[in-house]
Image: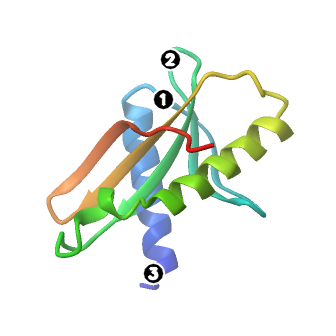
């Protein structure tokens, strides 16, 4: 299985998991010039949730959560801002979550980071 196909499979698994937790999937792989957001969801409080899905086979280099660097956070935030502007929701309440996948399972990290913008 290619890395891209593997990534898509983990993103689909994360989306199903988050839907089971009460979130509603709005869009997958939102891509713009500024960056990409793996999953865009809405929670029960009507907040928009921008989700980064990360997989790491082992934690030798810090694990999946540690791989969401400040540079990656900035790209996600810029893509989220682009989404908000183009979907005419500039005043929406938002948060940035992460779903990490490893050999030990899946973990949902709410408010994994705050927008660096």
Residue 32 position, x and y percent, is 76, 59
Residue 96 position, x and y percent, is 49, 39
Distance in Å between CA atoms under marks 1 and 3: 26 Å
- What is the number of the mark on residue 106? none
Q: Secondary structure at mark 1?
A: loop
Mark 2 packing: few (<14 Cα in 10 Å), some, or many (20+)? few
Above or below, 94 relative to 52: above
Lower position in the chain sequence, tag 2 or tag 1: 1
Q: Split into 4 quadrants, where in the image is the N terminus?
A: bottom left
Lower position in the chain sequence, tag 1 or tag 3: 3
Q: Secondary structure at mark 3?
A: helix
Q: Secondary structure at mark 2?
A: loop
Distance in Å between CA atoms under marks 2 and 3: 33 Å
Q: Pointers 2 and 3 in contact (CB under 8 A)?
A: no
Residue found 62% across the figure and 22% down from its top: 93
Q: Which residue is mark 1?
A: 23
Q: Which residue is mark 3?
A: 3
Mark 3 packing: few (<14 Cα in 10 Å), some, or many (20+)? few
Residue found 37% across the figure and 49% down from its top: 99
Q: Split into 4 quadrants, where in the image is the C terminus?
A: top right
Quadrant of residue 90 within the rendered picture: top right
Above or below, 112 relative to 78: above
Quadrant of residue 24 within the rendered picture: top right
- Confirm whether residue 78 shows in the render: yes
Residue 39 position, x and y percent, is 56, 48
- What is the number of the mark on residue 44? 2
């Amino acid at each position: 299985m290619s890395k891209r196909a593997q990534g898509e499979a983990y993103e689909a698994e994360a989306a199903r998991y988050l839907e089971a937790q009460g979130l509603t999937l709005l869009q997958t792989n939102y891509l713009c010039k500024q960056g990409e957001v793996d999953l865009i969801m809405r929670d029960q409080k009507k907040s928009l949730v921008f989700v980064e899905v990360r997989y790491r086979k082992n934690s030798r280099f810090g694990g999946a959560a540690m791989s969401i660097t400040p540079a990656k956070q900035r790209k996600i935030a810029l893509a989220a801002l682009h989404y908000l502007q183009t979907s005419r929701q500039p005043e929406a309440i938002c948060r940035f979550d992460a779903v990490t996948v490893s050999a030990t399972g899946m973990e949902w990290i709410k408010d994994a980071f705050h927008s660096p913008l």
